Image (cartoon, rainbow, N blue to C red):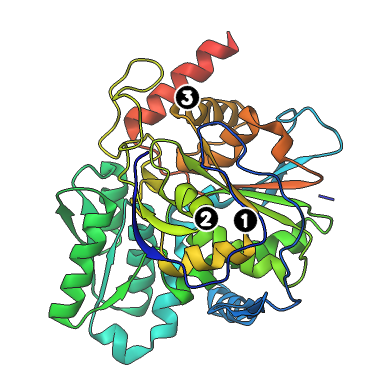
Amino acid sequence: MVASARISMRVGLPRPDRARPAPSACHALGARTGPRGRDNATRSVGGAVLPVDTADVWAAAARLSGVARRTRIVVAPGITGDPGSPVWLKCEHEQHTGSFKLRGAYNRIAAAGPRARARGVVAASAGNHAQGVAFAAARFGAAATIFVPEGANPAKVARTRSLGARVEHVPGGVDAAIRTAAAFAADSGAFLVHPFDDEAVVAGQGTVGLELLEQIPDLSTVITGVGGGGLLCGLAVAIRNQRPDVRVIGVQAAAAPAFAASFHAGSRLTVPPGGGASDTTAGDGRERPPAGTVADGMAVGAPGRLTLALAARLVDDVVTVDEDAFWDGMVVLRRAGHRVEPAGAAGVAALLRMPHLASGPTAVILSGGNLDPAVDRRVAALAAARAG
């Protein structure tokens, strides 16, 4: 065993068979009532044909062989206090470039072929996808241009440049950077590696799920942070075909709840990060960061069309947590020896607030470890103070 939002489109999949309440911070959003008419193959679920299946994930695993690390799992003692629901941590913060994002970026670039790569690669990112794209582009000798928000983590930007990519700052957040990257691709002929709304990217992230099924044979629940939905949906695609009983749960910042709000509404909503917050300060009186949440890696204003459609059929729940929960999660992990960034600590943050989410053997994805230096110092100070 080891907030206010506007509707921008309807999801083109049948509605699941249970209603979903509106999301709220630090609250489990709905109870699972069992599989929603899933077939044994994720290409066709409940009569709906899905654009990504486990064959795509296995193909991604073949491309990533010898490139991505098979990250370890470690026990997380005492998080839930329930010996019947042991919690395992999947250490994707120890992946090359410091996050899972390498998997999807590399798979997309590898699958594109030499002609596409010769035109150059363009991407948009808060920082982790940027590093994954830069790493992969360098492996293939492709030029990479990456647009990042003006408030992007400077450490992530520096590492991206060190991998050979050209980095351009864009006013606004991740969504503005994505629009700029798409326009650049249209004008230059470079091919776009979307951070989450891309079939090959989702399939690449799904390789985390293949590893989990081998590492934890009696797996019952998987919990991961969610921004645009690439990792969450990749996990669901990879796991559901082989283990349809496994629950897949996403965790998002209450200050940037676009995916959670859309998932529960059954419609794609635009919710600017920070726009749903009732005030402009975090729980300890500090000003909110430029991304609207300390978890900059999930500060996306709208989910992907592809990922939301997949989640509507394959994901059990998406919950939200407040800003203080991210700090608590990072401190708990630091004291256990893990330097994890806020978005990477989302699953642990959720379990600290909602321990009932762990049902049976549970895996939590530590999705990234690229901390902003100021955040790193604060986590270290909080951990030291609580240890005393």
Q: Amino acid at mark 1?
A: Thr
Q: Mark 3 falls on what kind of element? A: helix
What separation in Å lies between label 3 and label 2 (alpha carbons)?
Answer: 26 Å
Marks 1 and 2 in Cβ contact (< 8 Å): yes
Q: Amino acid at mark 3?
A: Asp
Packing grade of label 2 (10 A; few <14, some 14-19, many >=20) is: many
What separation in Å lies between label 1 and label 2 (alpha carbons)?
Answer: 7 Å
Tag 2 residue: 95
Q: Could you tell me if residue 28 is visible in this image? A: yes
Q: Position of residue 262 (x, y in %)?
A: 46, 53
> Closer to the camera: disc 3 or disc 2?
3
Q: Nearer the viewer, residue 279 or 107?
A: 279
Q: Mark 1 falls on what kind of element? A: loop
Q: Residue at x 33, y 73 (%)?
A: 137
Return the mark for residue 375.
none
Q: Earlier in the sequence, mark 1 or mark 3?
A: 1
Q: Amino acid at mark 2?
A: Gln
Q: Position of residue 31 (x, y in %)?
A: 70, 45
Q: Residue at x 45, y 25 (%)?
A: 379
Q: Nearer the viewer, residue 266 or 354?
A: 266
Tag 1 residue: 71
Q: Mark 2 falls on what kind of element? A: loop
Residue 247 shown left or right of residue 280 in the figure: right
Packing grade of label 3 (10 A; few <14, some 14-19, many >=20) is: few
Q: Position of residue 20 (x, y in %)?
A: 59, 49
Q: Could you tell me if residue 68 is visible in this image? A: no
Residue 162 shown left or right of residue 257 in the figure: left
Residue 32 shown left or right of residue 178 in the figure: right
